[in-house]
Image (cartoon, grey):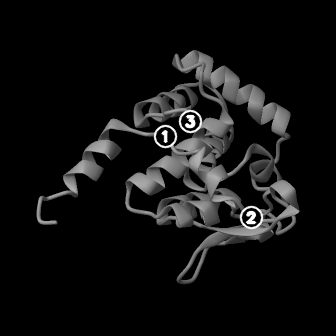
Amino acid sequence: MPQKVSDEEVEKLKSIITGRKTHKKSIDRDLLIIELLYNAGLRLSELTNLRVTDLRLTGEAPHLKVLQGKGGKDRDVSLNPYICSRLKAFTKGKAPEDKVIGIAPKIVNSLFTNWAKRAGVPQLHPHSLRHKFATDILNRGGSIRDVQHLMGHESLATTEAYLAVTDEGLSDAVGRLDGSA
């Protein structure tokens, strides 16, 4: 079964990061890691390979380009206004060839493991937020095909493996049956 990740668990991670006594740039970077993993559904390697030049943060359809994702495939991931704003602020002054996050996957994984333990949610890992991304899009009215495209899956079965069944999702589904059929 796919891992269920609650909004509260994500907030606990973010709270651990913002509560640290460290340089503000580190806090901003670490929050952006959590936010990109969730808001863009990125894999860890996609996050750490992302360059400023891969961001399209203006225009009618802001998105980022994942280059050479799993299986060597490229894809575009639409961005919401919040994450667009965060990326604009974070990358201001960086050169186009600079990496957005600028640290290796092993370091991000180690940081994440530490945050999760300190937040009391040790079962979470970076890929957990990719699962949450998929489930939340579907629960908020997106189609499974939308999720499939955003995640870069060839097979719909692969996408289905990411989707957690939630109590509210089940209630909403049943609530759509109004007896008029």
Identify the mark nearer the N-term, 1 or 2: 2
**Which numbered tag is attached to residue 42?**
none
Look at the image and tell me in which quarter the C terminus lies: bottom left
Q: What residue would you read off at disc 1?
A: 164
Question: Farthest residue toward the front?
Answer: 181
State the image quarter where residue 104 is shown.
Answer: top right
Residue 76, given in percent of the width and then of the height, sits at: 69, 70
Q: What residue would you read off at disc 2?
A: 93
Look at the numbered disc 2 and give the secondary structure of its residue.
loop
Q: In this rendering, would 90 be left or right of 66?
A: left
Question: Farthest residue toward the bottom?
Answer: 59
Q: What residue would you read off at disc 3?
A: 2
Above-or-below relation of 9 to 114: below
Identify the mark nearer the N-term, 3 or 1: 3
Look at the numbered disc 1 and give the secondary structure of its residue.
loop
What residue is shown at x 85% (from left), y 57% (from top)?
71
Q: In this rendering, would 78 be left or right of 43?
A: left
**Disc 3 and disc 1: Cα gap in Å?**
5 Å
Which kind of residue does numbered mark 2 sit on?
Answer: Gly
What residue is shown at x 22% (from left), y 57% (from top)?
176
Between label 2 and label 3, give the one nearer the viewer. 3
Q: Dot 3: within a 10 Å radius of its alpha carbon, few (fewer than 14), some, or many (20 or more) residues?
A: some
Residue 5, given in percent of the width and then of the height, sits at: 49, 34
> Of 131 and 44, which appears nearest the observer?
131
Which kind of residue does numbered mark 3 sit on?
Answer: Pro
